[in-house]
Amino acid sequence: MKKIVLAFTLLLQILVCSDRIQLRSGEAVRGEIIKTEDGFLYFISGEKFPLEEIKEIGFGNLEESAGKTDEKASFLKGTEKTEYSWYFRKAAEINKKYPGCDYIHIIDEGFDMLNRDGTRVFRYKFLGYVNTSKAKSDFSKFSFYIDEERIRSRMVRARAIYPDGRVYNCDPDVFEIVKPQTESWSYGGSNLKVMTIPNVDIGTLVEYEYEITSFNPYNRRIFETSFFFQGKAPSFKTSYTVAVPYEMSFTEKDLNDPAGENKVLLKDVRLNWVTYNMSALKLRSAPVISNAGGHRYYKWEYYDIPPFVEEPYAPDSADLLPNVQGTIFFDRTYLDGFFRTLQNEKMQVTPEIRGTVNAIVDPADGPEIKLAKVYHWIQRNIIYLSVKGSVSSGLTGHPAIETLRNRKGDCIDKAILFATMIDALEVPGLKVYPVSIKTNDIEKMVIDIPVIDANHAITEVHYNGKIFYLDGTAESYRYPYFRGDDKGVPAVNEMLGTVRMIPVPAPEDEMNYYDINLTVLKNGKIKGATKAKYTGDYEARLRGYYMAYSGIKERKDIFASMVNSMSPKGVLKGYGLSEPGDFLTPFELSYSYELFDHPTLAGDFIIFNLPGFDFDFPEIELSERKYPLEYTTSRYTGHSFTVNIPRGYSVEYLPSPLNVKTDDFEYSGEYTVEENRIIFRSTYKRFTRIISPEAYPEFRQAHLEILNYCRRNIIIKRK
Amino acid sequence: MKRTVFPMALIFFLATAALTADTIYLKDGNEYKCSLVSITEKAVTAVLDIDGKEKVFLKADVTRIILDKKRMFAEVTNINQIDDPDIKRAFNLAVDRRKYENSLFISIMDKTVVSVKNGQVEVVRKYIYMPLKSDGITAASGHYEDYFKNHERMSLDYAMSISPRGEITPIYENLIEDEIPNSNFPEYADKHVLKFSIPKVTEGSLVAYQVTKTFTASDLEHSFFQDEYFETYTPTIIHEIVIMDPELITYRILNKGKFRIKKKNGQVAITYPPSGEKHDYFFVPSLSLFSPRVILSLNTDPKDFSERFSGALDPGSPEIENFLREIGTGGTDPEALTEAVYKYIQSRIANMNILPSDDSFYPRPAEKTIERGYASVLDKTCLAFEALRYLKISSSLLFAADSKEVFGKGEPFNYRKYPYPLLKVELPGKQVYLYFGSKYTPCGILPKHLYSAHFFDAVHGGFGITPSLDRNNIDLLREIHLKGNINKDGHLEGEITVDYDKFSDAFLREFVDRSEKENDITMQQVLNNLLPRSMLIGYSVSGNDDTNKRVTVKMNFLSYGFAGFAGDYLLFNMPLLSFDGYAAASEKREVPFAFSADSRVKYLIEIVLPQGFRLSYFPGNLNLNTQRFSFNTVNKYFNDAFSMRADLIYDDGMAPKSFYFKYRKIMRKLVKFSGELLIGEKK
């Protein structure tokens, strides 16, 4: 019923500026709003609604026209029939060349046009051939994200075409507006407009063409383009064209004076573009440039692109696919200024913020302790929640005081608050800035041209000449450690206008280290004690884990399970751990145990491997790689075993030392004997997080040797 | 005017720093939290939250305004101003937090009041939580409430946090969203999710919210049904159900529990004593099997359902005839015809993962299903029913419950307890059950959870139980054969052959729809699961293109460093058998026991030592047998080789908690056996 009301209401609209309200019942009403009075909202038509029943009021939205509803089914004729018959043959040809793909991408055409007044249009055309039921399901539905205050979207055409020429058209007037489910911590996302392409089937062509007009861009100067030339499906033709005007002319709000407006004239506008990953497919990077109608056109066009096949543990596919990125800026001056203005107004130190900071730190604390305490407080006291409603909150979050009062915020909110709280400390030489990054679990940030390309915000700390980074979004990182997925990526500091690389930390800063003392008895029982130390991601994970599992019984069960996994009849004798909530103390744990039946007793021999010494490297399963192997961060794993053997026994066999090293990592393992003790030291250090395909074979072989090594047994013999 | 803002109110607002809830969004991208004062032809006036000052915006600069809903307690800032006795009771309750050291948060109150007024069922549900740890704050402040938009009116009456000092912070509109889980097919899924997050929740504060759902009592599309559990993993102190109209709303108690039922003034009040923490996380059966439950529903006559259902079916439409022509149903053998119909529907109509309980228990017209080419399981089942009816093959359209569902004696019928549509086909000499879930499921095989399942007949009425799955059924059996040689470097080279059981071969049947490279990666993972740290040299898959055939996989592998040399000795562990005692470490048990799945696996492992070595030490047979678990081996040793046959059987039925201790002893023996070293010695 609701859908029909909505569609019907839209059909009745004429193309004028029109306000709208959305009622709490879900229905939308459009018209010109003239006033509110006595608890009611009035339209010019005289219609009125109680304010209590209204959820949202929108102003001045241009309505999209209701398109003509095509017939349900028709047939291709004449040249069009010939053309599409050719496409079917082409699809068959590509299928033969690249079997096993869900669909074939026959035409993939994008067009981005920036208008003189800063508005812009994006048009896209797709023609594909459906191979599987997955593709059939995927292409039966088409959806746009909508933002009625800023963009207008229009389905130009959408249809399914059969080999016999039958065509089933999508009815553009039939759609649903839905709010798709998002993460539990995410609010303020856009609605989706969902339409159906009827009768899509395996063996049909699916064609759609749409247009998105940004009639009210949040900033007319910021124009960024992006297009990828390869995907999981093979494509016949992929092309992308960007058109920018020679000149732009528009008015905009004065960034420094909310009441003011500036007339802007930009001359000689050009596209600043960069391409990536073109050489692997031998694609020409430079576009074909032409001029027409006051615009400069940049066109990239390619044919016969093979499908992209993923490799496990490889970088994000967007880092591997050929693509082009573009902007009309040639330096970051404007962008940084834009961000800076929005950020500055949110980073105001208020008495409430100052009071909160003073309650967290001790006046006697040194600067770094103060910094650490505020860092820990932000992690533990501001719940992660993302509420995006506008560009301002989307790009630069909410005012610090708001985040503090709500005790909720997302990455940029936390970064803004953290920086403001440090400002409130007024420590000479200490300054914290919010910075934009892209976490290393997705594609790399584009920094070769000045674009807004971030998915996360953290903080850059400047203290006494040193620069380092902290991330308040996690919940259990001891200062100065921060999330692993922030490592090895660029950080854009808009306030200072800099771009710096966040280094991959030394392996010792991503450490798990075990000090194990074992006593082997003649009856095969082993008494053991393990002490473990951690830093970085390891430490944070365990700290968080034990903060959540804080009950005595739970913790005992956890340690008992660890002992049991070493040996089936293992018995936990005792355990201890540092207070996980004490962020100023490194997190360590220890436990003692007895293992029964671990060694094998074979006559005069006792044979055993070292319980708790094991490695697993699932990432080296491929014998060769086309793409790099990517880790989150560096790694250090250390073991130190002291094994007391029973009196009357001597060491019969110990594995030889193992030392392996490449540019990316090193490993050393060695057994020695001291009187009645076997000492084993093992150190694994990986310095980098990306292993190139060229370095991979040697890297893999070295890791296979480590796996082999940790399976080895010790043999002791009765004298 | 929404609110009249007086100077005193303004001061009060500033003094308590209460959050206002309206939000204004501007065209330049800025937004302001505020309290809307007025809208005129050209201007919007609001009092800003950040400084309490009135600001006038040009209407041309504003894109939209979100208005806060005036919910209950919207004007309240302190607990003393609240007159709700439940909230006051919860606030004043002295909670001994030491009793809940393992919990992130506890439920102070979970209260449901059900009434019927003017043909409308109204369910008012009140929740009050207390986070106990920092991590519990996130868990306690964010919530979801499901509802069905076409049938229910849902209202979030209030949601707020209450600090230990009694300060109230109500929710605001930006933190409430109405979302659709299945946004790809919105015209199908009726289910909506109201997602909301309560601000300013800190350790020791309370989170309180109330939702009211209203729907038409006579609505057969969506009959009232509520299933409430009283012993879960969230400790609860006050748990109550109040039925205002017990002559209309039926309640039934399932599984034993310490319920107290009071009948007074025509109402029924069901209470339960405080429930504590649960500490068992492994081998826990479905809560439905043992947690005390109360089912509330309206009395539904199965005949009413059947009548409505039958009326929605679409017999004899011409599209069915065309559809059958496409299948090529020219033969006369009913079994062959049934299989042809099943296979064609599965291949022709793509699946939408929507259960009747998410949408509607009533079918859509069959021609719509054919036209769309995608449909829910229910609509595919109905299409098959119509097709078979056209072919004059008798079948019954059933709705089945999960086999783990519990039905109480005399429990009134409610179709919402039976969410799985099935077709029971009458063939000469037998009955065949069809389920249109995964397209890779062979004809006549049901998912395991639909064997021994209660059902009712949607068209003809009547109840029954689907056949049980014989533990010795060949379709349950998986056979794994490893044959390998240890080479002079200690690596194991060989072949693993797996004959899959029909309940876990779907991922291999999907291979026909996927690329070679994707399949290569999957097979490497299959090998890694069987034999960790091994490399796949090559593989073949057979039988996966025909659902009547068993799927067999052959993998050639190299297990690097399988055996280690220690002087004259060669040491290695038994491959394939990898058992871990991690999950059976706890010395106590509070809840019953169940394996997560059942299975039957036969192993045959044959390994040859490298030339010049003979076997000098090896483990004996292992025989472990209980009612729910058994593992038996027959080991044979030769001079330079050995073989082991092993049978592993799990039964996933629920067992009493005492079985856990039996299993613990077994697991120790099993892990020891799998960790045993075999020793070869140089001749």
Image (spheres, coloured by chain):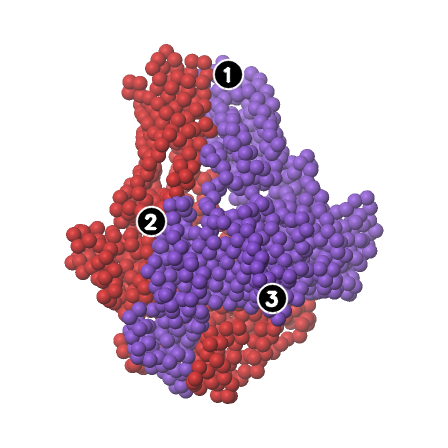
Chain colours: A red, B purple
- Residue sitting nearer the eye, B6 or A191: B6
Q: Which residue corresponds to mark 1?
A: B616
- Residue sitting nearer the eye, B375 or B56: B56
Residue at the image position 45 percent from the left and 45 percent from the top: B277
Q: Marks 3 and 1: CB-CB under 8 Å? A: no
Residue A683 image position (x, y, % from top left)? 32, 34
Residue B116, label in figure: 3
Instruction: Check the image and name the residue furthest to the right.
Output: B332
Q: Chain of mark 1?
A: B
The vertical placement of B248 against B229, above or below, is: below
Q: Is residue B657 left or right of residue A58?
A: right
| Quadrant assignment, res B653 | top right
Q: Is residue B531 left or right of residue B422?
A: left
Q: Chain of mark 3?
A: B
Inter-mark Cα distance, 2 to 3: 49 Å
Label 2 sits on a secondary structure element that is loop
| Residue A524 visible (yes or no) | yes
Q: Which residue corresponds to mark 2?
A: A476
